[in-house]
Image (tube, rainbow, N blue to C red):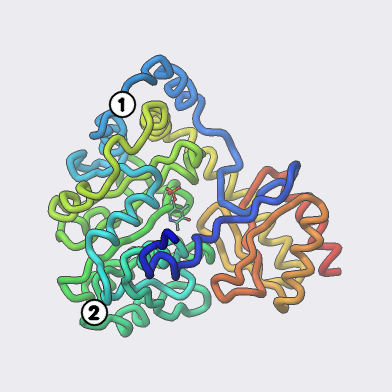
Amino acid sequence: MIRAVPHVAAMAPYALADLGGEGTVSLAQNESAFPASPAALVAGRAVLDQMPLYPDPEWPDLRAAVAEVHGLDPDRVLCGAGSMELIGCLIRAFAGPGDQVLGTEFGYAFVASAAAQVQARYVKARERELTVSVDDILAAVTPESRIVFVCNPGNPTGTLIPNSEILRLRAGLPADVLLAVDQAYAEFAYAEFADAGNDPGDTFALVERGDTVVLRTLSKAYGLAGARAGWGYFPPGIAGEVRKLLNPNNISIPSQAMAAAAMRDQAHMRDVVAKTAVIRDRFAADCRALGVEVPQSHTNFVLIRFASAQQAVAADVALRAEKLLMRGMGGYGLGDCLRATICSQAVMDRAMDVLKGVLA
Ligand SMILES: *Cc1c(COP(=O)(O)O)cnc(C)c1O
């Protein structure tokens, strides 16, 4: 009998979204409703003849694009096969058996899984009104705390805390606790302000302290989830350790080319963000008019809170009957909620018709 090491054997597999059967429209994975920049597709196709070669392990063009757009030092940018790879490597580098990885009540589920891989204890600080609470995070810090993960805007809540709260969190954390700010949805929250890299949501300056990292992804606002490209801004000392754990040649040649071109097409990204926000805000308002709670979202999804878990299940069943799949939230202790990725207006209209039938 071949056995896995005990802590792996004891782990549950990471719960990916149920994608339904053929013909099902997924509103379950927060993928972009719109295609990636046409420039990204051109760039990807243009490198297909390089496929016998390994990709550049230093991602030079993608790093340069990130640095240009955000006004950052390219040497401090690390790229991952999705930001999930960077999250996993951060935890493997800075937490081990018995250490505490601190997240928040409705924080990103993948962090818990990555902590289990290294036998670290994943602890969740309470959120208030579906929103990250800095005071509750600070109260949950113990001498075993190694890393604090904050997702801002939050997934699955969609809520945002101001940058000043992130600064207050950092100021209140012990110097030996690493802070990771996961900004997978930042473009939806900050795009309207992001001229010339002067982003009022900018937490990148915190990285200069040496104890904070900021993570971003091409998977959401840039419409490149299939490319698997994420990046983070790292202090040199942290980056050096994480680099040892990244797979070499981790991002394919077409993915690097597409990601760099998508970064350089900020106009396309902002257009996607603006169009998504219009559809989102209308859908959220229509949901509220039906009497369900929807927190103000700063992302490309909404969290729909029904009157009861029973009602959420009824809505899910009715949606599935129409080949529409939202994400159940029982794993987050939010059995009365469904999370709906914002898709095209036509898809959201179909979903709204189903919800009207269920809630009438
Ligand atoms: C989608 C998402 C990511 C990014 O995942 P990738 O690996 O870059 O595709 C990271 N954090 C959160 C909270 C997300 O929702």
- SS at mark 2 in the image: loop
Which of these two is toward me, 260 or 7? 7
Against 23, residue 56 (above or below) is above
Query: How far from the left and from the top, in percent, is residue 150?
Result: 37, 66
Q: Residue 54 carries which label?
A: 1
Which of these two is toward me, 13 or 295? 13
Residue designated by label 2: 144
Query: How far from the left and from the top, in percent, is residue 210?
Result: 15, 59
For the N terminus, give its image quadrant: bottom left
**Badge nearest the viewer, 2 or 1:** 1
Query: How far from the left and from the top, in percent, is residue 295?
Result: 58, 68
Residue that appears at 18% across and 55% down:
238
Give how far apart the Cα atoms at labels 2 and 1 are.
40 Å
Instruction: Choose top left, top right, bottom left or bottom right for residue 209.
Output: bottom left
Question: What amino acid is labelled 1 in the image?
Answer: Tyr
Position of residue 325 in the picture relative to residue 56 (left or right): right
Query: How far from the left and from the top, in percent, is residue 37?
Result: 49, 30
Please say whether residue 331 is visible from this viewpoint. Answer: yes
Residue that appears at 70% across and 54% down:
325
Q: Which mark is residue 164?
A: none
Position of residue 136 in the picture relative to residue 108 (left or right): left
Are the residues at dot 2 and dot 1 in contact (C-beta closer than 8 Å)? no
Position of residue 38 in the picture relative to residue 193 (left or right): right
Instruction: Choose top left, top right, bottom left or bottom right for residue 124.
Output: bottom left
- SS at mark 1 in the image: loop
Against 334, residue 253 (above or below) is above
Question: What amino acid is labelled 2 in the image?
Answer: Glu
Question: Which residue is at the far top?
Answer: 49
Precedes in sequence: disc 2 or disc 1: 1
Against 83, residue 304 (above or below) is below
